[in-house]
Amino acid sequence: MKGTNVHYARKRESIFGRYRLRHLLGRAIIYTVLISLSIVYLLPLFWMISTSLKPAGQVTIYPVKWIPDPVRWQNYVEAWNLYPFTKFTFNSLFIVIMTVIGAIASCTLIAYGFGRVRFRGRNVLFFVLLSSMMLPGAVTMIPVYVLFAKLSWVDTYKPLIVPSYFGSAYYVFFLRQFMMSLPLELDEAARIDGAGHLTTLTRVILPLIKPPLVAVGIFTAFDRWNDFFGPLLYLSSREKFTFVLALRALQVDTVYGSHYEWLMALSLIQLAPMITIYFLAQRYFIEGLSITGVRG
């Protein structure tokens, strides 16, 4: 009997040993793949940082010199002073702030209507709204441009800001899914206390949907800050350029455009605000996406 128990114990240890070995091997393969992919994705960013700190003579040499010698921080100051980038930064920030306010306000109201208010034709209207996401931007580009031209909005910031105050189908869907996951008893309790829809939205629903609202704000800010085509289409006065548009103008400049160290320095400056915002608000950002994904 004792010999049989020892045999089974050794067999269990052998099975557990093989299981641990396969588990460790699997994790090693996963980490190797993840680290390899991370290096591939981070390589362009590292090249940008390296190039932005190189002297002009080391930018295009082959093989690539990854570590600048000497490190030239002066590239950032020189690049910033080539054009009035301070003004371009404020122009971009103005557009970003106004569009974020517009997107959050309009999408919240529309999502509340579709998610918490029952009325005839609600599903049909929501289907029509979702259908608008299937239209390619190129189809509506010319009619929208003609409309803004007739309104004399070309070469102003209005075409870049005003549309955000009429909602976005994707963000409305995003917020509606979260609102529908909240118990309807909250609305009923608010109505018993005499609250209307606006009061229910502002005092009951809004405090509960902070994570998805932050996610919508971050998405909108990323989109507007990095937008190149919109400003290119509607802005012609140089003093109204956004940062991205000015960066493109510098790239095609016959005098400064060949200095990749300046272009990379400005590109990193352009990336910095969005990376900062993401890290500051990533808790709300990830929470908003995960909660909406699970409950939607």
Image (cartoon, helix red, strand yellow):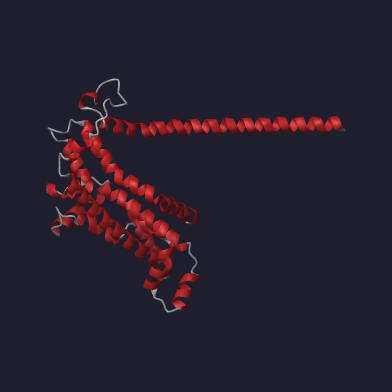
Residue 18 visible in the displayed image: yes
How far from the left and from the top, in percent, is residue 159? 20, 55
How many numbered badges does the structure rendering display? 0
Q: Nearer the viewer, residue 127 or 252?
A: 252
Q: Nearer the viewer, residue 280 or 264?
A: 280
Up the image or down, 35 lies above or below 198; here it is above
Classify residue 70 by image quadrant.
Answer: top left
Q: Nearer the viewer, residue 121 or 190?
A: 190
Residue 120 visible in the displayed image: no
Residue at 34%, 45% (x, y): give it. Answer: 275
Up the image or down, 226 lies above or below 102; here it is above
Classify residue 110 by image quadrant.
Answer: bottom left
Q: Quadrant of the N terminus?
A: top right
Residue at 24%, 31% (x, y): give it. Answer: 72
Judged left or right of residue 250, residue 175 is right
Judged left or right of residue 231, residue 103 is right
Residue at 18%, 43% (x, y): give it. Answer: 246
How far from the left and from the top, in percent, is residue 45? 33, 34
Residue that protrudes farthest toward the right in the picture = 1
Up the image or down, 284 lies above or below 275; here it is below
How far from the left and from the top, in percent, is residue 25? 58, 30
How far from the left and from the top, in percent, is residue 179? 44, 62
Judged left or right of residue 109, residue 192 is right
Residue at 30%, 43% (x, y): give it. Answer: 272
Q: Nearer the viewer, residue 151 or 260?
A: 260
